[in-house]
Image (spheres, rainbow, N blue to C red):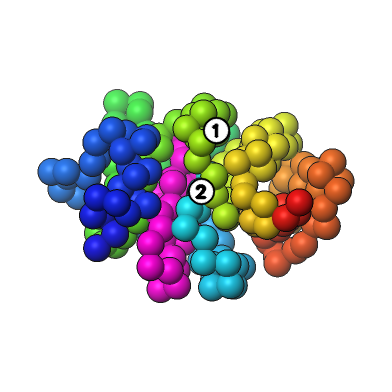
Amino acid sequence: MTDQPGSIFWALMRRIHNDNIYAGYIPTCEEDRQGWNSTHQAFEEIIRVMRPSVVIDVGVWKGASTIYLASLMKQNAADGAVIAIDTFLGSVEHWDPNSGFAGLIPHRFGMPLLYEQFLSNVVRSGMHDRIVPLPQTTTIAGSLLSRLGVQAGLIHIDASHEFEDVLRDARLYWDILLPGGFLIGDDYAPDWPGVVRAADLFAEEKHVPLMQSPPKWIVRKPVQ
Ligand SMILES: C[S@@+](CC[C@H](N)C(=O)[O-])C[C@H]1O[C@@H](n2cnc3c(N)ncnc32)[C@H](O)[C@@H]1O
């Protein structure tokens, strides 16, 4: 079990929540792992080779990518955890009735119930001894992790797809990516011009090659 005192999971859970947030939790939602590009092969390749002990998933929705990342870590490493960051409120496209992504979030009295769905999925998957949820904006979560001295070997960026937001998230999380670590972003595709523009600009700014494993964009932080 990785949730024993002394494990990376437990150290992160204590540092972030000062508590085991799963204690006494019983899933309230049926399993619903709907997501997008959540089990992409780039995750498997990087985790198998790098065996990172800390992974950060930025924009987790109902938990499909987070659960997949955690299960890959379980297959490939003895100890490790995924920090799952999301407001659990949805992105602009999930609220825009004309976007084609509306109607996917259950609400109660106007409030999205994404966190309940996420938590239920995580516990039903059995990966709750490897996943530390951090229900915050990407900006506050990134600043918090930086203050806490948390660094990761793999970071997946899949929150807002607006140009300024993607660029801001990439810059913020690059600072807590370990040297030699990988940053993977989702939706480098014509349907998401803001993502493409931000990824191109970011790679140029950091002087690193932009790799593609469609629709993921991938950059590696130089070792030094
Ligand atoms: C495309 S979905 C993530 C999909 C997920 N990676 C998967 O595999 O299914 C984007 C998520 O980003 C979250 N999000 C958008 N903007 C955010 C922000 N500024 N801070 C935190 N989360 C945000 C939304 O709530 C949404 O759940």
Mark sitting on residue 195: none
Q: Is residue 2 left or right of residue 139?
A: left
Mark sitting on residue 146: 1
Q: Is residue 182 left or right of residue 110?
A: right
Residue 83 on the magenta span: yes
The quadrant holding residue 25 is: top left
Looking at the rendered image, the disc whose residue lies closer to the viewer, 2 or 1, is 1
Residue type at tag 1 = Ser
Among numbered discs 2 and 1, the one appearing first in the sequence: 2
Helix, strand, or loop for circle 1?
A: helix
Q: Is residue 159 left or right of residue 204?
A: left
Residue drawn 30% across the image and 48% down it? 10
Relative to the observer, which residue lies in front, 158 or 108? 158
Relative to the observer, which residue lies in front, 214 or 104? 214
The quadrant holding residue 68 is: bottom left
Helix, strand, or loop for circle 2?
A: strand
Mark yes or no: residue 207 visible: yes
Residue drawn 54% across the image and 44% down it? 151
Q: Is residue 221 above or below residue 18?
A: below
The magenta segment:
59-87
Residue 118 in the image, given as x and y percentages of width and height: 34, 47
Residue 212 in the image, given as x and y percentages of width and height: 75, 63
Q: Is residue 204 above or below residue 153?
A: above
